Image (spheres, rainbow, N blue to C red):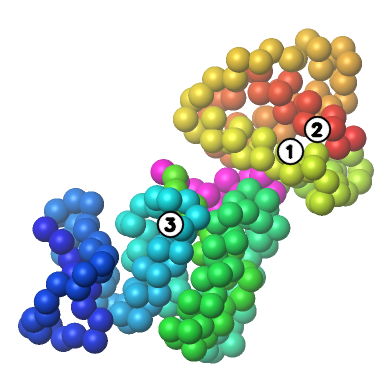
Amino acid sequence: MTADIGFGRKAGDEFTEIPGASVYTPVVREERNSTMNVVNTIDPVYIEAAGKIIEAAEQVFDTIKRDILLPLADHIAFAAKREQEKIFLSNPFVPDIKILFGKEYAVALKSREIIEKMTGYRISDDEAGFIALHIHSGLSDEQVSDTLKTTQIIDDCILMIEECLGDKIRQDSCAYIRLMSHLYYMVVRAKTGEAVNIELNDFIRCKYPKAGQISEVICHYIEKKLEKKLDKEEVGFLAIHIQRIM
């Protein structure tokens, strides 16, 4: 059973099927009522804008889960309202999002043109960062809130590494980008229970003891935040990336 969104129509109106029109279906039949309740609270223009953003994402990623339509539309509606009321919502994770989800962020930046054309409001780069997380959610099994938590953990880890080193890490360096990416997939592995089959701990203790010590601190922090035990091999694997920025 599908939920059809007829823009410019009222309840009870009939309309013929439009060739090429997108049809969005609730994943579970029981969700239909709650889904329609959400639809009724969002101005159709924001749902249509979200649909066009998903289509733009499909041109880059080929496929994306369309169940992000309503959460994305809801976010766009509030972003437009904030813009209308001149309320600025800061997104401190934009630099991290650019590195971790570069393609998603590029689509989100383009989505600003779609939103402006359809609503008259041009959202900020910070708002685009949040839209990038919605797009990432459509490409993975992660909820936006989970991705935000992961990004916060990674950001904390970078600050901790800088504190241990007593210096800032150059964010435009390849080593920094690799470190960020490694931390992200490290968290993902912890969540999924995926093992690392690379034993570097003895080598690290011998050759790069400081990087190993910092890595142990970071791994303990991640375990605490996720409430999950990391494989001991993660220490040496991460230490290699930390050594590259020292």
Quadrant assignment, res 179: top right
Q: Residues within 10 Å of mark 2 (few under 14, many from 20)?
A: many
Q: Verify whether residue 143 appears in magenta.
A: yes
Residue 244 is situated, as x and y percent measured from the top left of the image, at: 84, 32
What residue appears at the point 48 percent right and 78 percent down from the top-left corner? Answer: 115
Q: Look at mark 1 in the image and give the residue it sits on.
A: 179
Q: Magenta segment range?
A: 141-155
Residue 242, labelled with which disc? Answer: 2
What residue appears at the point 83 percent right and 46 percent down from the top-left corner? Answer: 173
Rounded to the nearest angstrom, the CA distance separating label 3 from label 2 is 35 Å
Residue 126 is situated, as x and y percent measured from the top left of the image, at: 62, 69
Left or right of residue 139, residue 205 in this image:
right
Q: Is residue 10 above or below residue 26?
A: below
Q: Look at mark 3 in the image and give the residue it sits on.
A: 58
Residue 76 is situated, as x and y percent measured from the top left of the image, at: 45, 74
Left or right of residue 98, residue 211 in this image:
right
Check whether the beta carbons of the residues at disc 3 and disc 2 lie within 8 A of each other. no
Amino acid type, callout 3: Glu
Q: Residues within 10 Å of mark 3 (few under 14, many from 20)?
A: some
